[in-house]
Image (tube, rainbow, N blue to C red):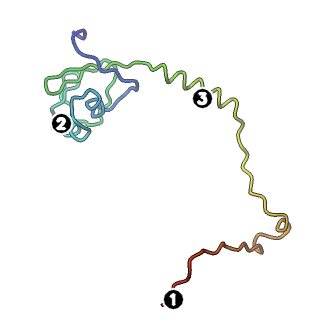
């Protein structure tokens, strides 16, 4: 029976039902998906589903508006190559130490409370009434 049902390929499992309806182009948008689910128009594994964010897994069958699709999870090659490149970068990078900004030589022996830094003046003229 699953041979004649079209497959919807996803890369992340589980996926929310409202998102799956959008991916499968069964609805126009997320708002519409949530409405049709809450009104009971969507079947998951031949049972009416009212949960908008119902978790859908591999081989679940979704039916809406006369269309039937089956969920298929595919492993992405991109993720595994990204993960290996990220671990190589992490091994090569050393953690940076957090240091304070150094004060000018004139202020190094003066306590912080006594140091007054002049604020740059703006180029605007004061307004007088």
Task: Pick the residue in front: 75 or 37.
Answer: 75
Q: Position of residue 107 (x, y in %)?
A: 82, 68
Circle 3 residue: 86
Residue 41: image quadrant is top left
Viewer-nearest of discs 2 and 3: 3
Point 74% across, 57% down: residue: 101
Label located before the other in sequence (2 or 3): 2
Label 1, on which residue?
128
Left/right placement of residue 127 relative to residue 65 reads right
Residue toward you, 103 or 8: 103
Element carrying mark 1: loop
Q: Which of pointers 2 and 1 indicates the residue nearer the eye?
A: 1
Mark 3 burial class by Cα count in 10 Å: few <14, some 14-19, many 20+: few
Q: Is residue 80 above or below residue 21?
A: above
Residue 81 at x, y percent in the picture = 54, 22
Q: Residue at x 39, y 26 (%)?
A: 13
Position of residue 113 measured from the top left corner of the image (x, y, whole percent): 75, 73
Secondary structure under the numbered disc 3 in the rendered image: helix
Q: Spatial distance from mark 2 to mark 1, Cα to Cα?
A: 63 Å
As displayed, is residue 109 above or below residue 59?
A: below
How far apart are the two marked residues, 2 and 3, measured between alpha carbons? 41 Å
Instruction: Tell me which label, 1 or 3, sits earlier in the chain.
Output: 3
| x 48%, y 19%: residue | 77
The answer for how far apart the CA atoms under marks 1 and 3 are is 59 Å
Image mark count: 3
Q: Which mark is residue 36?
A: 2
């Amino acid at each position: 029976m699953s041979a004649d049902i079209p497959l919807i390929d996803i890369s992340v499992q589980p996926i929310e039902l409202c998102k799956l309806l959008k991916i499968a182009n069964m609805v126009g948008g997320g708002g519409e998906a949530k409405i049709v689910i809450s009104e009971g128009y969507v079947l998951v594994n031949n049972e009416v589903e009212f949960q908008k964010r119902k978790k859908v897994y591999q081989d679940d069958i979704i039916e809406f508006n006369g269309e039937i699709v089956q969920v298929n999870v595919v492993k992405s090659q991109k993720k595994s190559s990204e993960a290996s490149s990220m671990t190589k970068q992490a091994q090569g990078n050393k953690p940076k130490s957090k240091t304070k900004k150094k004060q000018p030589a004139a202020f190094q022996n003066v306590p912080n409370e006594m140091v007054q830094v002049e604020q740059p003046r703006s180029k605007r003229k004061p307004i007088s009434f």
